[in-house]
Image: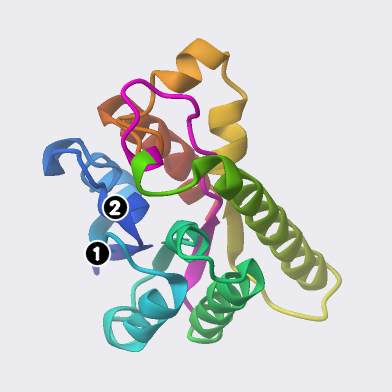
């Protein structure tokens, strides 16, 4: 029996920046439902840089499932969120055309304020919050439109929205804050939460 494969693809939130490999969501998910999970996240990349790796690391590898997350670095660097959204949409649609199921993720909003401040010394996090909120809204609307088209018979979609942002924000503030290593990146406990959300999506495929 051929083993199924999922590739986690994107920026530091896919890579698991600051967390030991053994505690990253990709490691926690490996083996679930018969899936071998590979991590192809790269810290610091914008969506255009992520997209530049897409053919080699996704299409040429022919995984069964793509987990895709990105956009934070675009916003940090002042890139238009519509450009980031177009990159995410293009990768999603290329994967779907290739017969790859897609788990398209939202980015959990940044945990502000946080003590000690780290990324706030480098990035205007307050200004970035509205950008992430807007990008997440575009991702939700896009996923809904693809799913509606598939349900109406005017398209095919093996796309599921993995709404990490909504899941994290559904928690009481103290618990939400406990999931972060710094203002941006989830800690070991946050990765366990990621894994639970993604596991639920995989179970629907």
Query: Residue 65 placed where, x, y %?
Result: 41, 66
User: Which of 148/165 is in front?
Assistant: 165
- Residue 54 figure quarter: bottom left
Is residue 104 found inside the magenta-colored segment of the image?
yes
Position of 129 compared to 156: left or right?
left
Q: Secondary structure at mark 1?
A: loop
Q: For the point 40% across and 39% down, which residue is it?
A: 120
Q: Within the magenta stretch, is there residue 141?
A: no
From the viewer's side, name the closer residue of 128 and 135.
Answer: 128
Q: Residue at 43% x, 61% y: name it.
A: 73
The residue labelled by disc 2 is 34
Q: Position of residue 49 (x, y in %)?
A: 37, 78
Relative to 89, 123 lies left or right: left
Vertical arrangement, residue 164 with respect to residue 100, above or below:
above
Residue 47 — which label?
none
Q: Residues within 10 Å of mark 2 (few under 14, many from 20)?
A: few
In the rendered view, would you say 150 is above or below 52? above
SS class, disc 2? helix
Tell me where residue 160 appears, x and y as whole percent: 60, 57
Q: Taken as a whole, is the magenta stretch helix, strand or loop?
A: loop
Q: Quadrant of the N terminus?
A: bottom left
Residue position marked by numbered label 1 in the rendering:
3
Q: Quick check: 146 left or right of 17? A: right
Magenta highlight range: 99-120
Query: Is residue 108 visible in this depiction of the protein?
Result: no
Q: Nearer the viewer, residue 188 or 38?
A: 188
Instruction: For the residues labelled 2 and 1, say whether their Cβ atoms are less than 8 Å apart.
Output: yes
- At 50% from the left and 40% from the top, the residue drawn is 200
Visual colour scheme: rainbow
Left of 8 or right of it: where is 132? right
Q: Residue at x 57, y 19 (%)?
A: 171
């Amino acid at each position: 029996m051929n083993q199924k494969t999922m590739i986690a693809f994107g920026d530091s939130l896919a890579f698991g920046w600051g967390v030991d490999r053994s505690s990253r969501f990709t490691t926690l998910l490996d083996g679930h439902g018969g899936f071998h999970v590979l991590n192809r996240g790269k810290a610091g990349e914008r969506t255009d840089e992520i997209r530049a790796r897409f053919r080699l690391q996704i299409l040429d590898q022919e995984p069964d499932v793509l987990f895709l997350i990105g956009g934070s670095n675009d916003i940090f660097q002042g890139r238009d969120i519509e450009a980031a959204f177009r990159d995410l949409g293009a990768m999603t649609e290329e994967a779907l055309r290739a017969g790859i199921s897609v788990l398209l993720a939202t980015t959990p909003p940044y945990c502000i304020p946080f003590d000690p401040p780290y990324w706030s010394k480098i990035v205007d996090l307050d200004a970035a919050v509205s950008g992430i909120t807007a990008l997440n809204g575009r991702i939700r609307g896009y996923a809904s439109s693809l799913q509606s088209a598939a349900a109406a018979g005017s398209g095919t979609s093996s796309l599921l929205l993995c709404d990490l942002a909504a899941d994290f924000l559904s928690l009481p503030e103290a618990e939400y804050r406990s999931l972060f290593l710094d203002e941006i990146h989830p800690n070991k406990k946050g990765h366990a939460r990621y894994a639970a959300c993604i596991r639920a999506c995989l179970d629907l495929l």
